[in-house]
Image (cartoon, rainbow, N blue to C red):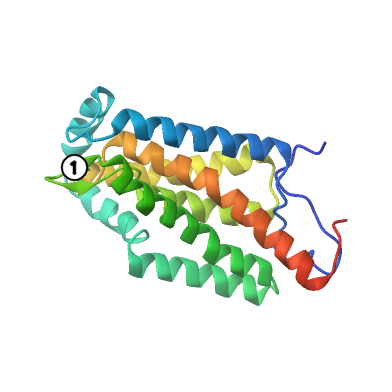
Amino acid sequence: MNDSPVVRVNTEVSRGVRTRLGLSLGLVSLVAAATLVVLGFLFAGQSVGAPVDIGIRAYLRSLHQPWHQIALVIDWTGEPVGATVVVATLVIVFLRKGNRQAAGFAVAGPAAAVVVTYAMKPLVGRTINDGFLSYPSGHTATATAYALVVMLVAGRKLWLVLLVALAAAMVMAWAQVLLNAHYPTDTLGGFCAALAVVPAVGWAVYRLDLRRTGATPA
């Protein structure tokens, strides 16, 4: 079996999102989902973070300007207005290239990641800053989702998809911890949330487009 996370389709849909799940990516998503749930059980009801969080938070919160300004810019891309700008930009780019599948994926992928994180927060009940629900990090899930959408649409190898997604997650995680919005382990949960759901959303978009067009995979 081709170990690429992307399977090319025939001419009628080749300009779309080529995200039919391969076995390797499916297994990675399952591991991410399991990790997300296990961490949720471990952190349920916490209000002080895990031991691993303490040193990382102390170091990042000690950083001064201009790091906080940079972190705020990164954080903005996960806020409602910033996320809308990022997603709209992706949609416009994909539509200009004739990728209606990709445009739909650009909306549905990040949206699904955000829904999962928001649904899990009250279930886990982990808090930071006097009661704000923190696990998993929606901002980190959103940043990871952006990277996954772009890399899966581009049809890159699985290792490169995961590498770029991890890099995007780490950048957002840095910003979230520095701004004292999340524990480091919250951001790990956000990364896992996106990795668990975004590829599945891409597969669903791919299958729906095949059904709509009557096309068959190449």
Q: Where residue 163 sits: x, y (%)?
A: 55, 39
Up/down of 10 relative to 61, above or below: below
Up/down of 7 relative to 91, above or below: above
| SS of the residue under disc 1 | strand
Q: Where residue 111 sits: x, y (%)?
A: 47, 61
Circle 1 residues within 10 Å: few <14, some 14–19, many ≥20: some
Q: Determine the image quadrant of residue 18.
A: bottom right
Residue at the spot x=50%, y=53% of the render? Answer: 145
The residue nearer to you, when weighing 68 against 118, is: 118
- Can residue 15 be seen by looking at this rendering? no
The residue nearer to you, when weighing 176 against 205, is: 205
Q: Is residue 3 left or right of residue 75?
A: right
The residue positioned farthest toward the left in the image shown = 130
The residue positioned farthest toward the front in the image shown = 123
Q: How many marks?
A: 1
Q: Where residue 36 sits: x, y (%)?
A: 44, 36
Q: Quadrant of the C terminus?
A: bottom right
Q: Where residue 22 sits: x, y (%)?
A: 73, 42
Up/down of 205 relative to 160, above or below: below
Q: Quadrant of the N terminus?
A: top right
Q: Is residue 3 left or right of residue 40?
A: right
Residue at the spot x=54%, y=63% of the render? Answer: 108
The residue under label 1 is: 128
Up/down of 216 relative to 119, above or below: below
- Can residue 21 be seen by looking at this rendering? yes
The residue nearer to you, when weighing 147 against 132, is: 132
The residue nearer to you, when weighing 139 against 33, is: 33
Q: Is residue 37 left or right of residue 98?
A: left
Residue at the spot x=48%, y=67% of the render? Answer: 87
The residue positioned farthest toward the top in the image shown = 51
Q: In the image, what residue type sits under mark 1?
A: Ile
Q: Is residue 13 left or right of residue 86?
A: right
